[in-house]
């Protein structure tokens, strides 16, 4: 499962969004001076799964999911402590909820509402936390090299020094160009600034015109410079509106959204954009028992995708029957797609595309 962790200063709306996305009803609480995370699962909105469910009327419908973690806010000096909280250390991406709403009745941690300053302050915390890890590792490498130099140690030291230079220059590691082998070397350090970052700009009710365009909202909040950084995305929401939508039935919620000129709630955009930012796509399986979306990294081959369904399918993989979602929906049935030659047989090296509907042929 994809893992994501929410960060943000107090009164940013972070916990409200977490509760709405994951249907968790209790805010995380820190006990006995120890940081603790609450973990919830959000379903990735996907109209394709809904449409397949209408076609097949299966016993079960299973969308793709993303795990979100929320923390009792540590404040300005808390990023280093996040490394000790497993759901944060192990997260695939970070979601930073940035306050842009100006409600004077909601206290702010600083003297003035300044989204750009908050975003940079949080980024600086991540950089400092990573720099502490880098410096500790360099000390260990230097001690080991006194006992005897190896090519592996020298390569790691050169890589760690590159990381240190980037961090000291105020540049997050998510923007550092690295080879696959170098990324593998760094994986165990679980650097916070190396994780993809989604900025969620929490705007005022008066700024609903910005909700459909996260980039416009970011620019209005002074966050344009952040969007130029690698591995960074943006979504605009209004947590106050999201709370109102969450209390309506489906028909009223749709009407409310239509009045705002929006196709879906902001929490859906947060979930979907997180999924996209991580470079994941969904392939689909459909049948009388279940219609399901499966999460895989973009560029995954058919045999590896089969392994997501079950390891036996990967081991005994023969061929994958593949039809595009659009073709199946247009024809209305898999047999009609076969009759029109639209179902392809693909081998283990086939690169799965988003929305492929796959049936795996395998031998036990």
Image (tube, rainbow, N blue to C red):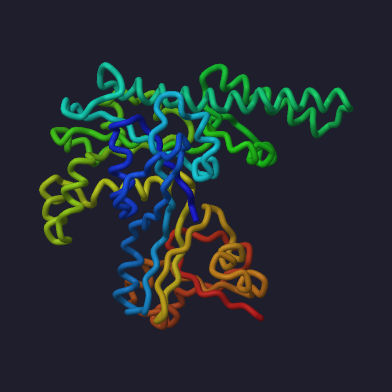
| Residue for point 46% across, 38% down | 35
Residue furthest to the right:
148
Rendered residue at 69%/38% (across/down): 185
Left or right placement of residue 104 versus residue 168 in this view: left
Q: Nearer the viewer, residue 213 or 96?
A: 96
Residue displayed at 62% across by 19% down: 165
Give residue 46's position: percent from left, percent from top.
34, 60
Taking the image as shown, residue 40 lies to the left or right of residue 216, namely right
Q: Residue 95 sits in which quadrant? A: top left
Q: Give the position of the C terminus as an image quadrant.
A: bottom right
Provide residue 291's location: percent of width, then percent of height: 40, 72
Instruction: Give the answer, above or below, for where 312 lies relative to 256.
Output: below
Residue 295 placement (x, y as % from top left): 48, 58
For the residue pair 240 and 316, the one nearer the viewer reads as 240
Instruction: Give the residue at x 16% y 28%.
Output: 105
In the displayed structure, would residue 7 be above or below residue 143? below
Q: Is residue 131 left or right of residue 256?
A: right
Position of 61 with respect to 350 (left or right) is left
């Amino acid at each position: 499962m994809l893992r994501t962790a929410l960060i943000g200063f107090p009164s940013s709306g972070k916990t409200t969004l977490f509760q709405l996305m994951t249907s968790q009803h209790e805010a995380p609480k820190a006990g006995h001076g120890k940081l603790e995370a609450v973990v919830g699962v959000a379903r990735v909105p996907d109209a394709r799964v809904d449409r397949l469910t209408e076609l097949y009327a299966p016993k079960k419908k299973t969308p793709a999911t993303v795990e979100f973690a929320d923390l009792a806010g540590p404040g300005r000096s808390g990023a280093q402590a996040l490394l000790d909280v497993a759901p944060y250390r192990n997260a695939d991406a970070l979601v930073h909820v940035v306050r842009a709403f100006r409600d004077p009745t909601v206290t702010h941690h600083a003297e003035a509402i300044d989204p750009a300053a908050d975003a940079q302050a949080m980024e600086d915390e991540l950089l400092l936390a990573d720099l502490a890890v880098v410096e500790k590792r360099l000390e260990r490498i230097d001690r080991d090299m006194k006992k005897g130099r190896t090519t592996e140690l020298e390569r790691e030291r050169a890589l760690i020094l590159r990381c240190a230079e980037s961090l000291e220059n105020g540049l997050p590691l998510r923007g550092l160009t690295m080879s696959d082998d170098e990324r593998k070397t760094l994986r165990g350090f679980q650097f916070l600034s190396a994780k993809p970052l989604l900025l969620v700009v929490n705007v005022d009710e008066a700024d609903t015109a910005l909700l459909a365009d996260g980039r416009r909202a970011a620019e209005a909040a002074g966050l344009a410079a952040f969007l130029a950084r690698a591995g960074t995305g943006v979504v605009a929401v209004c947590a106050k509106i999201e709370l109102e939508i969450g209390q309506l039935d489906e028909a009223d919620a749709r009407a409310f959204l239509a009045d705002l000129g929006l196709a879906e709630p902001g929490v859906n955009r947060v979930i979907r954009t997180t999924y996209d930012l991580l470079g994941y796509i969904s392939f689909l399986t459909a049948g009388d028992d279940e219609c399901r979306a499966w999460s895989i990294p973009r560029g995954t081959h058919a045999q590896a995708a089969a392994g997501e369904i079950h390891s036996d399918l990967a081991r005994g993989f023969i061929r994958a029957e593949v039809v595009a979602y659009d073709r199946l929906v247009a024809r209305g049935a898999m047999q009609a797609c076969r009759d029109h030659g639209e179902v392809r047989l693909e081998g283990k090296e086939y690169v799965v595309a988003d929305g492929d509907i796959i049936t795996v042929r395998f031998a036990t």
